[in-house]
Image (spheres, rainbow, N blue to C red):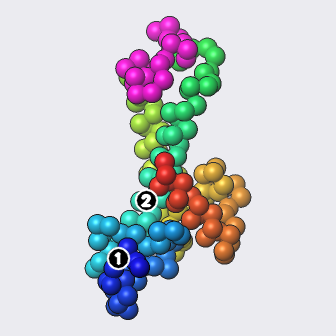
Amino acid sequence: GSAWGDWALYTDSPLRAFESELGVQAPVGYWDPLGLTKDGDAEAFRRRRVTEIKHGRVSMLACLGYITPEFVKFPGYCSPSTGLAFDDIPNGLSALSKLPGAAIAQFVLFCGLIEKGLYEYDPARAPGDYANGGVLGVPNSSTLPAGEAKTRKLNAELANGRLA
């Protein structure tokens, strides 16, 4: 039987409203444990899906940023004026206590520029498919393939973002 019980059998079930959308994947299928989509609002669903893709991308990069310093450190200085070498910066969240305020400000500014300037939401495009995004987010590089290959890649990205 279904994890949703008899409710999943009804043809007018809110669970069926978005079951053919991007991100509905085996083995779970459509999953909305909080019932956020039971009102059937397509625009709200799309906004949540765009947000899920964005946060998934940030989470995947955060995982890389957390793991990479365990194996690789840049040579030289992070802040020559304070004598702070990259080797002196600890891994993980404790790195925040060692970084100068200017480094943190640069990071926040860069994230803000990416958020507000580089990738603009276009309702005519699929969630996560930005006109100038390209592969791996490199602006104006080759874009995602069309059709089924594009759907497969975006579904894989959603699954990896959920895992991260």
Is residue 36 visible in this depiction of the protein? yes
Q: Classify mark 1: helix, strand or loop.
A: loop
The structure residue drawn at horizontal position 32% and vertical position 83%, both measured from the top left corner, is 7
Q: Nearer the viewer, mark 2 or mark 1?
A: 1
- Mark 2 or mark 1: name the one nearer the start of the chain: 1
The front one of 116 and 6 is 6
Q: What residue is pinned by disc 1?
A: 4
Residue 89 among those drawn in magenta: yes
Residue lying farthest to the top in this orientation: 83
The single residue placed furthest to the bottom in the displayed view is 11
Neighbor class of circle 2 (other Cα within 10 Å; few <14, some 14-19, many 20+) is some
Magenta-colored stretch includes residue 128: no
The image quadrant that residue 2 belongs to is bottom left
Q: Amino acid at mark 2?
A: Glu
Q: Give the image location of residue 93, x and y in percent.
A: 40, 27
Amino acid at pointer 1: Trp
Seen from the viewer's position, the closer of residues 140 and 30 is 30
Q: Position of residue 47 (x, y in %)?
A: 39, 67
Q: Residues under labels 2 and 1: Cα distance?
A: 23 Å
Q: Residue at x 41, y 59 (%)?
A: 51
Q: Residue furthest front?
A: 1
Q: Residue at x 45, y 27 (%)?
A: 92
Residue at the image point whose x is 66% and y is 74% from the top: 148
Quarter of the figure with the N terminus: bottom left
* Residue interval drawn in magenta: 79-100
Label at residue 152: none
Q: In which quadrant of the rendered view does residue 19 lie?
A: bottom left
Image height check: is 52 above or below 76? below
Label 1 crowd bin: few (<14), some (14–19), many (20+), radius 10 Å: few
Q: Which mark is residue 52?
A: 2
**Percent from the top left, x then y, of residue 91?**
48, 23
Side of 69 where 37 appears, left or right:
left
